[in-house]
Image (tube, rainbow, N blue to C red):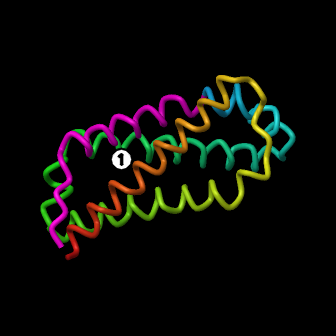
Amino acid sequence: MNIQIPNWLIILGGCGQIFTALIYPYIRHQVFDWYNDVKQLKPLNQEIAKTYGRYIQGLNFSFGLIAILLPNDLKNESNLAIAITGLIAAYWVGKVATQIAYYPMYDIPKKHIFKIGSYGMNALFVLFAVVYTLLFINNVF
């Protein structure tokens, strides 16, 4: 299968992933009041939660850098391109699936900006899932 994915779309996705990494602390603090919730955990569990938050932030940033700096390498059909695009596709498809399955049951604060932001972030997550899934399919077939 030969799907032509333009570099600009891969780079746009990379910029979006870096944006998600940079906005992540604001969302945790301002939208979800995450830090106050984490304070209710035992100290070790607090550190584990914070560490996983940093992992997510670091992965989003790293995936973005890879997309911006190496768009041609992500679609060159090599074994490494298959592995990387498969990993990133699984990550974002999993994020979208989790978002659909679990997040609707929670209330986001009613501020208009948060509502708009949630639509924008979900659109970005779907974009990432689609772009990397298409890259993975193109690399495999």
* Residue 64 in the image, given as x and y percentages of width and height: 34, 41
* Figure quadrant of the C terminus: bottom left
Q: Disc 1 designates what residue? A: 63
Residue at the limit of the structure toward the right, as seen here: 40
At label 1, counting other C-alpha atoms closer than 10 Å, the crowd grade (few under 14, some 14-19, many 20 or more) is many
Amino acid type of the residue tagged 1 in the rendering: Phe
Residue at horizontal 63%, vertical 54%? Answer: 99
* Residue 87 in the image, given as x and y percentages of width and height: 38, 63
Q: Quadrant of residue 19?
A: top left
- Where 120 sits versus 134, above or below? above
* Figure quadrant of the N terminus: bottom left
* Residue 75 in the image, given as x and y percentages of width and height: 17, 59
Chief secondary structure of the magenta portion: helix
Query: Is residue 17 on the magenta stretch?
Result: yes
Residue at horizontal 38%, vertical 57%? Answer: 130
* Residue 15 in the image, given as x and y percentages of width and height: 34, 34
What residue range appears in magenta? 1-25
**24 lies left or right of 125:** right
- Where 120 sits versus 137, above or below? above
